């Protein structure tokens, strides 16, 4: 029986936790054993989700002949544009250097989460002389589906934002969502509301409620099992992160038949096809966090709402074509075991 080591150990919520949970469950269904410690030998391959400080363990794994596959997300960058503590700056830079070291010296194979992520790493840190693959994140298409319980309102439009956190330097995404919601005009003049899922500091919530041009509901951090119902209960998802590597929230929304509105930064243009949502040019330099062209996105979002059934079908079709969980696992097994 093949055996794969998944590191590092992760807990709580977030993209890494979700990815490891989905991957390990699928591998075990296929009869592949899992371990979570590089010292728990033997195993055929080790999958490093991002990075690990156990560099000695990676080196020993290579010496034993195991493949060491590094799954790479994006690079820490926003700390270079927004003023924060020295501790935060150093932590972000140290994380980048650790990932780059594993990529160049310890990994035998690399998986990038999107073509954007691949180009980003090669641009900032040079080409790694390792075999690599681009494998999108995947979701269970039987769980994330347009069919199922929902509370989508019929008398108003609901714009949804789903992020793990919109606190600290990430509050920019929430500010953009409020501006967008205030500018969207549907042909039938139906009112619009904004629903926000994710961590938002109480003080920021109060400020938004006091100044928002539309009604806002903060639902907090939503458990993974409730995400499909949340997506089905909205009309449009706004992907708020700038230069997003491969956001799970977008892929999950598409699988639930929820069209996506976004700026063409990061991987969004390659994830969301014209049939699955509206992705418009940013209108400035996203790497400098210039103000984006909100009116253009608002106009595109209004057109999507006017033809919503077509976009809902297109969103689901895009997920079925590119983001199925088993398709993702097949890709990882090809890299891990050959």
Image (spheres, rainbow, N blue to C red):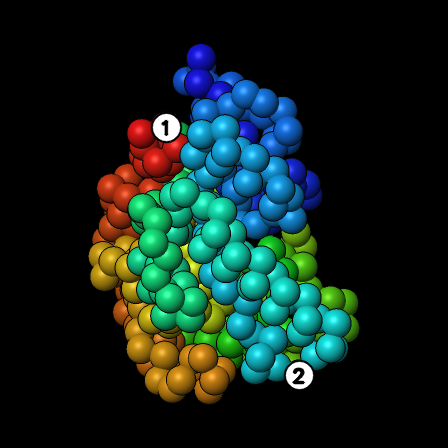
Say what secondary structure mark 1 lies in: helix
Q: Residue 178 in the image: state x and y as whole percent.
A: 54, 75
Q: In this view, does 133 lie above or below 302?
A: above
Q: Residue 217 in the image: state x and y as whole percent.
A: 63, 62
Quick check: 108 left or right of 227?
left
Is residue 264 something one can see in this rendering? yes
Depth order, front residue of 66/135: 66
Quick check: 95 left or right of 101?
right
Instruction: Give the quadrant of residue 34.
Output: top right
Disc sitting over residue 83 in the figure: 2
Q: Mark 1 points at which residue?
A: 337
Give me the residue at 45% from left, 55% from top: 104
Instruction: Give the quadrant of residue 220.
Output: bottom right
Is residue 149 something one can see in this rendering? no
Q: Is residue 276 above or below residue 240?
A: above
Quarter in which the N terminus is drawn:
top left
The local crowd at label 1, few if under 14, some if 14 to 19, many if 20 or more residues have their Cα within 10 Å, is: few
Q: Are marks 2 and 1 in contact (CB under 8 Å)?
A: no
Q: Is residue 235 above or below residue 136?
A: below
Depth order, front residue of 320/229: 320
Disc sitting over residue 68 in the figure: none
Q: Residue 231 in the image: state x and y as whole percent.
A: 47, 48
Which badge, 2 or 1, is on the more N-terminal residue?
2
Q: Residue 193 in the image: state x and y as whole percent.
A: 52, 66
């Amino acid at each position: 029986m093949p055996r794969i080591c998944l590191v590092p150990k992760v807990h709580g919520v977030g993209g890494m936790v979700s990815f490891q949970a989905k991957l390990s469950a699928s591998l075990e269904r296929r009869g592949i054993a899992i371990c979570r410690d590089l010292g728990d030998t033997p195993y055929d391959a080790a999958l490093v989700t991002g990075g690990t400080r156990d560099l000695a363990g990676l080196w020993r794994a290579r010496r034993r002949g195991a493949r060491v596959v590094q799954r790479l997300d994006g690079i820490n960058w926003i700390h270079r544009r927004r003023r924060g503590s020295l501790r935060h700056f150093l932590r972000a830079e140290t994380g980048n250097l650790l990932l780059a070291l594993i990529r160049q010296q310890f990994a035998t194979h690399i998986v990038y989460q999107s073509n954007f992520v691949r180009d980003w790493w090669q641009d900032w840190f040079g080409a790694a002389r390792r075999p690599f693959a681009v494998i999108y994140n995947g979701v269970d298409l039987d769980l994330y589906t347009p069919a199922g319980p929902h509370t989508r309102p019929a008398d108003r439009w609901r714009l949804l934002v789903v992020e793990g956190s919109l606190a600290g330097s990430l509050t920019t995404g929430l500010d953009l969502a409020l501006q967008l919601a205030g500018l969207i005009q549907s042909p039938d003049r139906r009112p619009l509301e904004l629903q926000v899922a994710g961590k938002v500091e109480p003080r920021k919530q109060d400020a938004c409620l006091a100044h928002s041009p539309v009604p806002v509901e903060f639902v907090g951090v939503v458990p993974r099992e409730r995400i499909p119902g949340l997506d089905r209960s909205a009309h449009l998802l706004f992907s708020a992160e700038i230069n997003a590597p491969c956001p799970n929230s977008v892929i999950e929304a598409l699988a639930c038949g929820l069209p996506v509105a976004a700026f063409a930064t990061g991987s969004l243009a390659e994830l969301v096809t014209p049939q699955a949502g509206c992705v418009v040019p940013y209108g400035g330099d996203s790497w400098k966090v210039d103000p984006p062209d909100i009116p253009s996105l608002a106009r595109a979002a209004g057109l999507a709402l006017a033809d919503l059934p077509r976009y809902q079908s297109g969103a689901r079709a895009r997920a079925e074509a590119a983001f199925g969980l088993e398709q993702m696992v097949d890709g990882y097994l090809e890299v891990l075991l050959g």
